[in-house]
Image (cartoon, coloured by chain):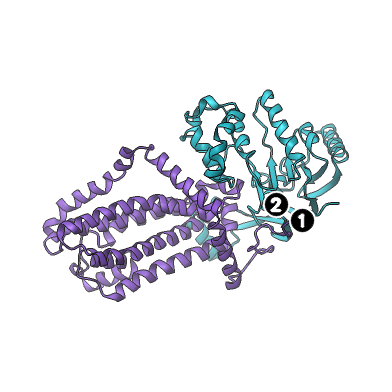
Amino acid sequence: MSEACVRVAHVGKRFLVPHTQRTALRALRAMLRGEALRHELWVLRDVSFEIASGTCTALIGRNGSGKTTLLRLLSGIIEPSTGVLEVRHPPRPLFSTAVGFVTELSVADNVYLFGAVHGMTRPLLAPRHAEILRRAGIAHLTHAPLKDLSLGQVQRLALSVFAETQDRFLIFDEVLGNVDRAWARRADRFFRELAGSGRTVVMTSHDPEFLRAYCSRAIWIDAGGVRADGPFDDVMAEYERSCDDEDAVGGAPEADAADGTLGA
Amino acid sequence: MNAPLQATRPEAPHLAVTRLDATWLGARALARVRALLAPANRALLVELVRTGFKVADHNTIAGALWSLVAPFAMLVALYLVFRNRFGEELTAYPLYLLLGIAFVNYFVTATRYLIVVLHANRALLLNTTVPRETVILAQVAFHGYKLLVELALCSLLAVYYGTFTWSGLAGAVPLVLGFVALVTGVGMLCAVVHSFARDIDHIWTLVSRLLLFVTPVFYGLDSLSPLARFVIYWLNPLTPFLVALRGLLIGPPAHPAVYAHAMLVGAGSLVLGYVAYLFVEGAALERT
C-alpha cells in the first residue's frame, strides 16, 4: 500500500455557539453576571482514518453530518479541537464555485482573481487564459461582466480555472451542482484524468453515480463520526440501505452535528 | 521525493488554547509571516488590491479622482470656517488642514472597513485557504493609496510654502508606516471584537465622527487648555503622528520624543492587535 497523504487521529471539532444575538451591551451584561455567552456544539468526535497518496476517496453522509467541517479541517481552514491531523502536501480545496469571483469585474479579470485565490499566479495563468475560457465554453464572453453570466457558466469557469492547479492534494465539496449535461461530460474527463493522475483527491457529492465513477473508497460520516469506511460500493450500499430504512420509518433522524452552523 | 506528513496548520496547536502563550503566539505569527511572503500569497495580495481599485473606482482615472473630492471639499469648508480663528496663528494653514484631514480620513475609512473584514469575507475565508492576513492587508493597502496621494499633494503644498525639505520627507516615511501599523492594529482589534459584538461598528462610527474634533485637525494644541492638551495628546493615538509629521513638513521640527511616541504607538497597536487577532481568530471566524 502507498504511503499516507492524510492522517486523521481521534480528531474532534467543537464550535462555541452564542446564546443570543451578540451586542456589546449583552456581552458586557453577561460577563458582569458571570453568565456563559456561548455553549459548546461538538460537530465531529473521535474521527480517525488515513488516506493513501494518489487515491480518490469519497466522503458521504447526510446534510449536517459534519462532512464539510471535516473537509475544512483537512484543508487547514479551521483547526481541530482535539486529536491530530496531518497532511503530506498542502491541500487545495474547492468548496464553492462562487467564492473567489467579483461579479462587477470582467470574465477575463475574474480568471486571474479566482486563480490567485486558489494559489495560481498571473504568469502561470496568462498563457493558459484563452484555453481556460474555451474549455469553459465562454470564450466569446471574455470582456463581459461576470454578473451577466448564468450560474452554470460561472461554475464552468470556476472548474476550468481550478483545473490548472498543480497541487497534489485536492478537495472537492459538491462542485457539479448547476452545470448542464454536455459540460458535465467534459468535467467527467477532467475528474477521470485527475483520478488517474497520482494526485490525492477527497470529494463529496450527493450524487452516488458521480462519486462511483472516480472513487475506489468511501468514508461514511454520520452524526459527527465515521460510521463506515471501506470499498466504495460496500459503503455506499450500506449508506443507501440506511437511507431507505429511514424513509420507511418516516424521515431521517435529527443530525447531532452542525445544523445551521458550519456543517454540510 | 515525497514531503513528510505535517499538521494542516503547522503553527497551530491541535488542542484549543485557553491562555496566552508567548511561544505559541510567536510560532504562529512567524508561520503566518512566512506564509504571507510566499510568492502565491504576494500575487494574491496584488490581485485583491487591483480588484479593490477596479471595483471602487470603476477602473477609470476619473473614478479615482472622484474619491479625492471629499477630502478637498472638507479642506475648503474647514479653511473658510476656521481661517480667521486659527489660520493666523498656524503657519501654512491649508497644508496644516490637509495633513490633518488626510490622516483622520485614512484612519476612519480603513478601520471602518477592517472592522467588518472577517464578516464581509466570511465565504472567502471559510471556503479557501487564502491567508486571512492577506485579506486584511489588501484593505489597508487599498485605502492607503488615497493617503499617499494626499500626502504627495501635501508635499507639493510644502514646496509652495517653502517649508519642504528632503530630510523632512525622508523622516515622514517611517512615520507614515507607523501610522499604517496603528490603523492595522486597531482594525484587527475591532474586527475581532466585531465577531463577538456585532454592534461594535455602530459604536465605532460614532467614535470616528468625534475624531475630527478631538484630533488637532483644524486647531493647534497650543490653543487648548492644559488639561485638554494633555488629554488630546496622550489619549488620542493620532495626535503624536500629526504633531510629528507637521513638524517635518511645516516646521518647526517636533521634539524627538514626539516622533518616538508616535512610532511606539504604531508598533504597539500593531503588536497588540495582531496578538489579540491570533489568539481568537479561529473562534472569531467560525462565529462571524
SS under mark 1? strand
Residue type pointed to by label 2:
Leu
Is B214 located above or below residue A231 in the figure?
below
Would residue A251 be visible to someone looking at this image? no
Gap in Å between the C-alphas at discs 2 and 1? 9 Å
Label 2: chain? A
- Left or right? Give the position of B83 relative to B276: left
Would residue B187 be visible to someone looking at this image? yes
Is A187 located above or below residue B101 in the figure?
above
In percent of width and height, residue A203 lies at 73, 41
Residue in view at x 72 percent, y 55 percent: A88
SS under mark 2? helix
Q: Are marks 2 and 1 in contact (CB under 8 Å)?
A: yes
Q: Kindly indicate which chain is depicted in purple in the rendered structure.
A: B
Residue in view at x 19 percent, y 52 percent: B78
* Camera-side residue of A136 and B87: A136
Chain A: what color? cyan
